[in-house]
Image (cartoon, rainbow, N blue to C red):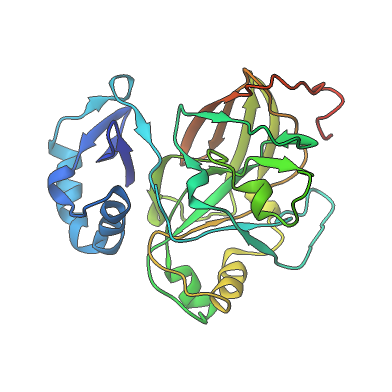
Amino acid sequence: MKFVFYDDFKPGLLKDGSVIDITDMLIGQTPQLVVEDFITRFKVLEPSLTKILETRKGMSLNNVRLRQPVPKPSLILCGVGGFGEGVGRKRPIEFFIKGWTSICGDGDTVTLPKHQARIFNHEAELAVIFGKTIKNASREEAMDAVFGYTCINDVSARAVPDTNGFWPQKSFDGFGPLGPCLVTKDEIPDPYKLGIKLWVNKELRQNYNTDDMSHDLPAKIVFLSEICTLNPGDIMACGTNHHGLGPLQDGDYVEQEINSIGKISFKISDPTKRFWDVKENTRP
């Protein structure tokens, strides 16, 4: 199934270009608690949700605004150098925490901060959404704790003066476009056969496959679970293939797509109107 939030964070399911409202099926005082209810009670709800998909009329996607499917996770853990990049590179597993306030949704605008970064980049990535609480997990427990997947873009400010580490350069408000939907694990039986593409102003920049992942998902999850407890609704971003990374600047229109998940888009605004030459600043 494909879970979404739409308009003022009403919960729904995607089906054939339409959104079917499921507000009456879920409980929670905030959008994050609502999606966590969907995640933790999914096995109980699944028969009823399947029937709703078959019988309830939906609204056209053209008439709704999709929102981020996981709006306020307790953790966003982002992988560093997660892909072989065509040369078999295999760096040690490494992660950093990205602030949840960086999350935005489909169609939103990412505003570049005034900080004088060397450059601002896009990083198209696969995101894993956890469905169970785990700590010190085995490989089998690790994959059992995966609930589903979505797209995330780890928008990045490079070499911001007077800052050290990944967090301050990755966590500006809006630097985590997420969506368009949360796809349950059963719809993606092999997460290592997913094509990931990103376009800026309709020009293809990133184009890679998850079969080039340096470490598989269980290895990443085991590593993380040995450091901190992972809970339903937490997010693990799998890192990116850096080929094709280029600048983001005022007026850009960005689209990101992952097979079996869908496409998310967002716009870039820079009040200071900085400029980087695309040809000189896009990685081969």
Q: Is residue 194 above or below residue 283?
A: below
- Residue 269: give x, y in percent of width and height: 59, 23
Inspect this view and state whether residue 28 appears.
yes
User: Is 175 left, or right, of 275 in this rendering?
Assistant: left
Q: Quadrant of residue 59?
A: top left
User: Is 104 left, or right, of 89 in this rendering?
Assistant: left
- Residue 226: give x, y in percent of width and height: 57, 79
- Residue 265: give x, y in percent of width and height: 51, 28
Which residue occupies 63% across, 31% down?
112
Residues 270 and 185: in front is 270
Q: Is residue 277 above or below residue 134?
A: above
Residues 89 and 6: in front is 6
- Residue 137: give x, y in percent of width and height: 50, 79
Q: Quadrant of residue 278?
A: top right
Which residue occupies 52% across, 51% down?
127
User: Is 136 left, or right, of 147 in this rendering?
Assistant: right
Q: Is residue 197 above or below residue 25?
A: above
User: Is 192 left, or right, of 235 in this rendering?
Assistant: right
Which residue occupies 18% across, 52% down?
26
Inspect this view and state whether residue 245 appears.
no
Toward the right, the furthest residue is: 280
- Total labels drawn: 0
